[in-house]
Amino acid sequence: MEILYAGCVGILVTCGIFLMLRARTFPVVLGLTMMSYAVNLFLFASGRLNSNQATILGQSIQYADPLPQALVLTAIVIGFAMTAFVVILSIRGRADLGNDHVDGIIPNKNKESQRESR
């Protein structure tokens, strides 16, 4: 179970890094979202993957650790707010620059302006 879980976290991190290295804003937003999902899974796994344990003290001899669950819930809320903020920034960048390149440079426009200046 732990190997499968670690593999899923690794695949999410790999896909997130790959998408964040793209030159467009939408893949960057998707990459950041995948990275936040990977961090959430990692935080949840830090509390050990145990099943059939009580979440309330006194109900059983062994109980599940509530701290990683609280951290994941907090990270989900923060991740949603971060994703909404990055989407608004990308929409504003698209409106101001006229394109959705991350660096703000239009490759073809620079070549056309060089031709016109000669």
Image (cartoon, helix red, strand yellow):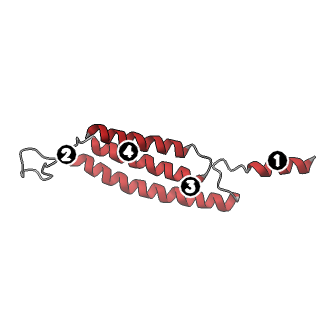
Say left or right for 3 vs 35: left
Residue named by callout 1:
111
User: Which amino acid, mark 1?
Assistant: Lys
Residue named by callout 4:
39
**In percent of the image, x 91 and y 48: which residue is there?**
117
Regarding mark 2 in the picture, which secondary structure is present there?
A: loop
Say which of 33 and 66 sits in front: 33
Sequence-wise, the earlier of marks 2 and 3 is 3
Distance from the alpha carbon under mark 4 to that under mark 2: 18 Å
The quarter of the picture where residue 95 lies is bottom right
Q: Which of marks 4 and 3 is in front?
A: 3
Distance from the alpha carbon under mark 1 to that under mark 2: 59 Å
Numbered mark located on residue 65 in the image: 2
User: Which amino acid, mark 2?
Assistant: Asp
Sequence-wise, the earlier of marks 4 and 2 is 4
Q: Is mark 3 in CB contact (under 8 Å) with mark 1?
A: no
Residue named by callout 3:
26
Distance from the alpha carbon under mark 2 to that under mark 3: 36 Å
Say which of 61 and 50 sits in front: 50
**In percent of the image, x 54 and y 50: which residue is there?**
28
